[in-house]
Image (spheres, helix red, strand yellow):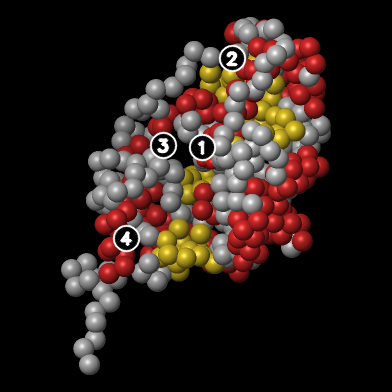
Amino acid sequence: MKVRPTHSPRSNQPFETERLRAQDRHWIHPWENFQTAGKIERTIAAHAQGIYIYDTDGNRLIDGPGGMWCVNIGHGNGEIADAVAEQIRRLSYYTPWSLGNAPAAELSEKLAEMAPGDLNHVFYTTGGSTAVDSALRFVMYLNNCLGRPEKKHIISRQDAYHGSTYLSASCSGKARDKNHLDFETGFIHHLPSPNPYRRPEGMTVEDFCDAKVADLENKILELGADKVAAFIAEPILASGGVIMPPPGYHVKCLEVCRKYDVLYIADEVVTAFGRLGHFFSCEAVFGVVPDIITVAKGITSAYVPLGAVLISDRLIEQLSGEQAGDGYFANGFTYSGHPVACAAALKNIEIMERDKILEHVRAVGPYFQERLRALTDIPIVGDVRGMGLMGCVECAIGREGKDSLALDYEIGARIDRHCQALGLIVRPLINMCVLSPPLIITRPQIDDLVSILRIGVERAMEEVHQEGLWNG
Ligand SMILES: Cc1ncc(COP(=O)(O)O)c(C=O)c1O
């Protein structure tokens, strides 16, 4: 009997991978590099279970980034699949402009119950960028209604990431993403990054904290408090490289905001829903009750897209009655409060509560951090930081020198390649391996992840050393 070949004799890849890679070339991926598009051999995910992704070549890979900080309860959860399927059969959609629906109503009450302080109102969006965008538009709307149309300036920070709509991208502060697009610069401002690793030589962390808080106050004074509407901040700057502002920073920033009647928006798109061991981290971990919180990602553990803006009673009350005039908040999406997304979120939250996933994160988080920090003995590792199940291993190859960025990219790409060959997806941000595995990860799985990462970093380091790119 003739045996049919399963692999291409040309590439030695399974036919399925070849076919999908060819089809994938029609897909413009986020952050596409059009110079290399179609030329790179992209891994194609086939299926996933728990903390593992399986590619079309049958390789099993630990999902180091948790998708994109979002696959919180892990892959392949049948209960969410059932909840989503059931909701699709019962009511797949109806316009949120005119009707309510059960999952969105129930989720709103649940979020209000779980959220800190008086953040009892929920505006649904389709993801994190639209949540940030909606939060900013809400702030503009509020100040217009309150008769202070000048109070519009937004203060953000370098290294922040807030999304990919025009407004949210304008608030993002990652220099390398600012190359070939246009941004709002008239009323959006960026403070220097609150990254203690990059603080001036000889400065204590406490003094650095005071300096970063002073940056905020000085910017408000420079612009005029009557012109500044809001400060937007991720509790931990995730995509900027898991930057942990110094202790006390958020509390002090909130005090400054209160002093000058500036709203504090906590962008918890990454840090909510368990990543730091709590449903919301701003109060539980950082001691601040903001005016507005944006969430997305982990709210559904990424089974379906959903984002939300949580807004305080205090702000909503200012808009009720006379002050609202005859206006309305003309902002919303066809899929705001999508019943299927909300059903997925409700089931996700139910599973997190029932399976004590937050408690699990609080238990294994310190172990994860300890194991990661042990990597600082690798000469090329400059800094290891993080909290809960969120970490970053930053390589220091290119901190100085004119080719530093190219070298940083080089080391990241090599770590990526080695780790993937060994069974771990890292996808470094330039020279930074950011890790946010599914929250169900166990201690032995943490050991596997960190062991692979160690070998990957060491191999990359040996290569750049041998090639004379780095002298250690
Ligand atoms: C803190 C933060 N805000 C907003 C966003 C944008 O979310 P989305 O990609 O769902 O639009 C992200 C995405 O990574 C994020 O990390």
Q: Amino acid at mark 4?
A: Leu
| Crowd rating for badge 3 (residues with CA inside 10 Å; few <14, some 14–19, many 20+) | few
Numbered disc 4: secondary structure: helix
> Between disc 1 and disc 3, whose residue precedes?
1
Query: Which label's residue is closer to the chain start, 4 or 2?
Result: 4
Quadrant housing residue 181: top left
Q: Does mark 4's beta carbon lie closer than 8 Å to ligand 1? A: no
Residue located 56% across and 47% down the image: 305
Q: Earlier in the sequence, mark 2 or mark 1?
A: 2
Q: Earlier in the sequence, mark 2 or mark 3?
A: 2
Q: Which residue is mark 2?
A: 153
Q: Earlier in the sequence, mark 4 or mark 3?
A: 4
Q: Secondary structure at mark 2?
A: strand
Residue 240 has which mark? 1
For badge 2, the amino acid type reads His
Quarter where residue 317 is shown: top right
Marks 2 and 1 sit apart, C-alpha to C-alpha, by: 23 Å
